[in-house]
């Protein structure tokens, strides 16, 4: 009799909860696969916009470096609004998009953070430094783009990884193929961006495009 009553109680409970179902606990492999789907991939995100958005935006915004430096000396904020990203975070320094054509007067290729000193006015002295990597400092390419918004990212770490991915894209696209010997004396054409330099320092340009001449 007790066994019969127990069976009846179970049937009543089952009938009273028609929406209940057993939820399977995911395996570690299934959890890892799901996490991979939602993981942030900065390189893929940069690849998706590099050719169609990044390069045209920097090229359109860029001014001749002599003109940009003169504008910065007169008013860094006005220069930033014209040649940089007017939607930048309030606490961030201005970043300026520029174009230059000049002669390489010095090359540091021994360091992983390689640079070229470029004379653009023909006086034999460097007017700018161009980063050639493979290690590239800063996030100038990201910061010069006004269609990017920090608030679209989950946290500061993703935003920083995204900025670094621009440098890696420049390196893989054209900087890695740049010769490391015999650069001094050659001409160079560059489009890129640089943050407001400290007083007395040369602008440090991260290139979005670079052509080496003779």
Image: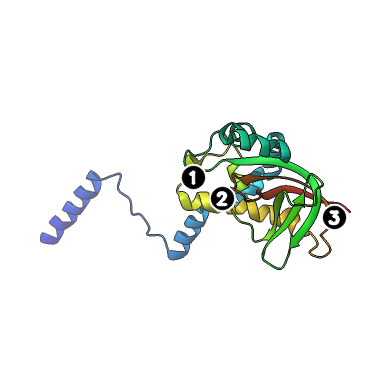
Residue drawn at (14%, 61%) of the image: 3
Is there a contact, CB below 8 Å, between mark 1 and mark 2?
yes
Judging by the rendered image, the residue that carries numbered circle 3 is 186
Residue 160 in sight:
yes
On residue 153, the disc is 1
Residue drawn at (79%, 44%) of the image: 121
Q: Nearer the viewer, residue 93 or 3?
A: 93
Tally the marks: 3
Q: Nearer the viewer, residue 189 or 31?
A: 189
Whether residue 84 is situated above or below residue 213 in the rendered picture = above
Disc nearest the viewer among 3 and 1: 3
Occupied quadrant, residue 99: top right
Q: Which image quadrant: the N terminus?
A: bottom left
Residue drawn at (89%, 54%) of the image: 214
Occupied quadrant, residue 147: top right
Is there a contact, CB below 8 Å, between mark 3 and mark 2?
no
Label 2: state its secondary structure.
Answer: helix
- Graded by Cα atoms within 10 Å as few (under 14), some (14 to 19) or many (20 or more), the crowding at tag 3 reads some
> Is 62 placed left or right of 161 in the picture?
right
Return the x and y of residue 15 as percentages of the image width and height.
24, 45
Label 1: state its secondary structure.
Answer: loop
- Graded by Cα atoms within 10 Å as few (under 14), some (14 to 19) or many (20 or more), the crowding at tag 1 reads some
Return the x and y of residue 55 as percentages of the image width and height.
70, 41
Label 3: state its secondary structure.
Answer: loop
Nearest to N terminus: mark 3 or mark 2:
2
């Amino acid at each position: 009799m007790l066994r019969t009553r127990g069976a009846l109680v179970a049937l009543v409970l089952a009938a009273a909860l028609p929406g209940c179902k057993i939820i399977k606990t995911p395996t570690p492999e299934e959890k890892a696969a799901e996490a991979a789907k939602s993981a942030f991939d900065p390189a893929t995100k940069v690849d998706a916009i590099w050719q169609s958005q990044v390069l045209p935006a920097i090229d359109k915004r860029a001014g001749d470096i002599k003109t940009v430096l003169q504008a910065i000396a007169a008013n860094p904020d006005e220069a930033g609004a014209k040649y940089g990203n007017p939607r930048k975070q309030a606490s961030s320094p201005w970043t300026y998009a520029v174009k230059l054509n000049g002669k390489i007067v010095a090359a540091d290729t021994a360091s992983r953070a390689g640079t070229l000193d470029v004379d653009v006015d023909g006086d034999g002295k460097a007017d700018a430094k161009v980063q050639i990597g493979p290690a590239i400092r800063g996030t100038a390419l990201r910061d010069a783009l006004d269609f990017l918004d920090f608030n679209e990212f989950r946290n500061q770490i993703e935003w920083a990884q995204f900025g670094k991915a621009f440098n890696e894209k420049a390196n893989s696209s054209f900087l890695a193929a740049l010769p490391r010997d015999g650069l001094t004396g050659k001409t160079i054409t560059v489009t890129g961006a640089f943050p407001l330099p400290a007083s007395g320092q040369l602008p440090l340009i991260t290139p979005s495009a670079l052509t080496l001449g003779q």
